[in-house]
Image (spheres, rainbow, N blue to C red):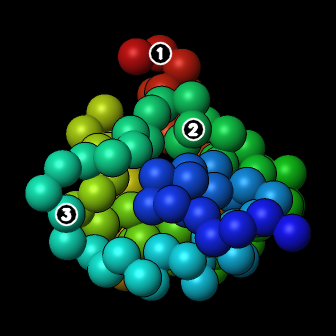
């Protein structure tokens, strides 16, 4: 059995919906939210991959919203390239509910940019 994860490994597992995501959630608690530096970048391909998970019913609207909220509240994540989309997914009551149509539109924007 693998030892505990470091902070970067845990962030990567959570952000990419890795196979050890559940373990990573329990590990990341050790580090808190605050950080002097951004240790992992949420890229357009990562966002596209997660959106495809939603479109193929591997994750739910709730999981997608929780994922985006996790990203928004972490100082140790850089998500500048996808900030607008993360905000939209994390705040469905302000920006509009998560739906297949909305996610498809975000994917089209990611591909076009």
Q: How far apart are the two marked residues, 2 and 3, measured between alpha carbons?
A: 22 Å
The spot of residue 98 in percent (x, y) is 55, 66
Counting other residues with Cα less than 10 Å from the Cα at mark 2, is it few (<14), some (14-19), or many (20 or more)?
Answer: some
Reading the image, the residue beneath label 2 is 46
Q: How far apart are the two marked residues, 3 and 1, measured between alpha carbons?
A: 32 Å
Mark 3 and mark 2 in contact (Cβ < 8 Å)?
Answer: no
Q: How far apart are the two marked residues, 2 and 1, measured between alpha carbons?
A: 16 Å
SS for tag 2? helix
The spot of residue 31 in percent (x, y) is 36, 76
Foreground pick, 11 / 109? 11
Q: Nearer the viewer, mark 2 or mark 3?
A: 3
The residue shown at (63%, 50%) is 16
Counting labels gives: 3
The residue shown at (29%, 66%) is 74
Disc with the residue nearer the chain's start (3 vs 1): 3
Q: Quadrant of residue 78?
A: top left
Q: Nearer the viewer, mark 3 or mark 1?
A: 3
The spot of residue 85 in percent (x, y) is 38, 48
Foreground pick, 70 / 110? 70
Tell me, for residue 94, which label it has, or none: none
The spot of residue 59 in percent (x, y) is 76, 66
Above or below for 17 versus 33: above
The residue shown at (57%, 38%) is 46
Reading the image, the residue beneath label 1 is 112
* 54 on left or right of 91: right
Q: Residue furthest top?
A: 112
Image quadrant occupied by the C terminus: top left
Tell me, for residue 35, which label it has, or none: 3
* 73 on left or right of 60: left
Image quadrant occupied by the N terminus: bottom right
Above or below for 47 versus 44: below
Counting other residues with Cα less than 10 Å from the Cα at mark 3, is it few (<14), some (14-19), or many (20 or more)?
Answer: few
């Amino acid at each position: 059995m693998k030892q505990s994860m470091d902070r970067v490994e845990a962030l990567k597992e959570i952000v990419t919906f890795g196979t050890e995501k559940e373990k990573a959630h329990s590990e990341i608690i050790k580090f808190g939210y605050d950080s002097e530096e951004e240790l992992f970048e949420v890229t357009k391909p990562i966002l596209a991959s997660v959106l495809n998970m939603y479109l193929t019913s591997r994750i739910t609207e709730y999981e997608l919203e929780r994922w985006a909220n996790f990203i928004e509240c972490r100082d140790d994540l850089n998500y500048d390239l996808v900030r607008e989309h993360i905000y939209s997914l994390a705040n469905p009551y302000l920006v509009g509910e998560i739906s297949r149509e909305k996610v498809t539109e975000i994917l089209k924007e990611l591909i076009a940019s």
